[in-house]
Image (cartoon, rainbow, N blue to C red):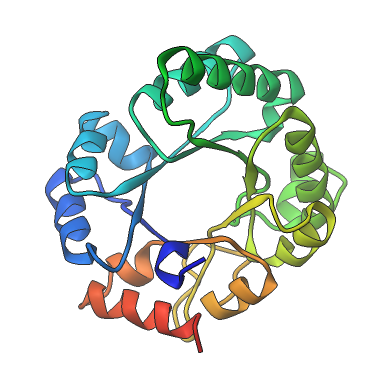
Amino acid sequence: MKPSSRLIVALDTPSRDRALDLARTLRGQVAVFKVGLELYTAVGPSILRDLKSLGAEIFLDLKFHDIPNTVARAVAEAARLGVAMLDLHLSGGAAMARRAVDELDAVCDLHQLRRPALLGITVPTSLSGEDLAALGIGRTPEEQVLALAALGKEAGLDGVVASPRELAALRQRFGPDWIIVTPGIRPSGSPADDQVRTLTPKEAVEAGADYLVVGRPITGAADPSEAAREILRSIIR
């Protein structure tokens, strides 16, 4: 995989203009942009069309989590919007995940749509072992990630979203062909912000990440283009 293909920039802003300005600035360096809850809620699905008109691929990061039928229908609508990747919370259970996979396959086959990669959210990078314990979960973060990933694999998902700290264990258990998308990436010297389980871009790629999701270290930089270039340089050294 080309280094430039690995980098996903998170457009975590409520502003359409800011999101599109970033996409234009980074065009040619970054192929995939993440649209999450903040931007999607503020602007709506039209932002996806705007980004696609710039030649961008989209990771729709809405982390669906509801009853199986509701999630399945939402996943189908996301496929109609032409996104490249989307995700759901594996804590929603096996039935929800399986129903989403079945609906996605059926809709894409029926309407001859490009099938987006469907990923499972494991344990958010902002949660520590103490946070899991407070939620009544007796596993360590790594144990919980592996358990949820196994559920997703069995349900037919294409991969997972997981923190850098669980990369090596995931790659060892599920092999080279399963997609691993990794947030919580922080270049050397960058503040962790609200992330708890982080690695540098180079460390994450070496541990087995397919895609790196980077937000504030790029979008909050004085020169986002140079910040992206430095991250790309770091993963090919």
- At x 81% / y 41%, what residue is drawn? 150
Looking at the image, residue 98 lies above or below residue 29: above
Image label count: 0
Q: Between 131 and 188, which is closer to the camera in this rendering?
A: 188
> 133 left or right of 178?
right
Q: Between 48 and 222, which is closer to the camera in this rendering?
A: 48
Looking at the image, residue 106 lies above or below residue 167: above
> 38 left or right of 61?
left
> 62 left or right of 135?
left
Residue 218's x, y, as percent? Answer: 32, 70
Residue 180's x, y, as percent? Answer: 62, 54
> 37 left or right of 137?
left
- At x 75% / y 45%, what residue is drawn? 134
Instruction: Please identify the residue farthest to the right as the structure is shown.
Output: 138
Quarter-of-image position of residue 136: top right
Residue 77's x, y, as percent? Answer: 40, 19
Quarter-of-image position of residue 59: top left
Looking at the image, residue 47 lies above or below residue 221: above
- At x 27% / y 29%, what residue is drawn? 45
Residue 207's x, y, as percent? Answer: 69, 72
- At x 50% / y 80%, what residue is drawn? 235
